[in-house]
Image: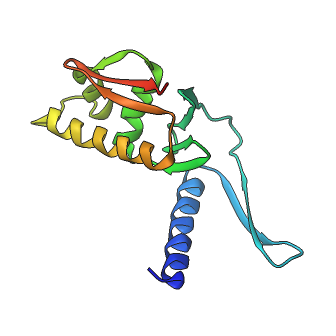
Amino acid sequence: MTAAADAIGVHLHARRVRRLLESHGYEVASVTNERGHIVTVIAPPEAPRETLAACGMQLDPDVGLLACGGALIELTAIETALLQRLLLRAESVVTQRDLSAAAWPGEPPAAYANRLYAHIFSLRRKLARAGANASIQTFRRGYRLAQRA
């Protein structure tokens, strides 16, 4: 990729994150400092947001953003629901049925185990890219979020 393509990719990602934050009540403003650099300022919404923290990660389930290893990761709604359940029960095995109930309230889809596996795979990939100090382990009964040694 060229430098111009990289810059465009960064710009598009920044716009997506900005829209996401604004859709959840955050105020986002970009200003230019004395040196001519653009600085983005983010003000939280009026009501304090509930965040979950475990294994060196912080999840804001309302926004679907995960702070991990100095990186900010955007998650899908299902990934957020799954990670929220895993964070609440960190270091414990969470059954597939419990995770499917978190991801799909009501009736889970047909072949939910395969879809669950795909979402867990995606979460693992995102955590690895961010350099997280935690991993999602597979067990016969379900999955466990564990801190790496």
Name the residue nearer the viewer: 39 or 135: 135
For image coordinates 65% across by 51% down, the residue present is: 26
Asked if residue 66 lies left or right of residue 121, the reply is right
Residue 64 point in image, percent of width and height: 48, 44
For image coordinates 16% across by 32% down, the residue present is: 113
| Most distant residue in the top direction | 92
Residue 108 in view of the camera = yes
Residue 112 point in image, percent of width and height: 16, 34
| Most distant residue in the left direction | 110
Residue 98 point in image, percent of width and height: 28, 21
Q: Quadrant of the N terminus?
A: bottom left
Residue 52 drawn above or below residue 21: above
For image coordinates 68% across by 60% down, the residue present is: 28
Residue 75 in view of the camera = no
Residue 130 drawn above or below residue 54: below
User: Hey, which quadrant is residue 120 in on the image?
Assistant: top left
For image coordinates 57% across by 66% down, the residue present is: 14
Residue 100 point in image, percent of width and height: 25, 29
| Most distant residue in the right direction | 34
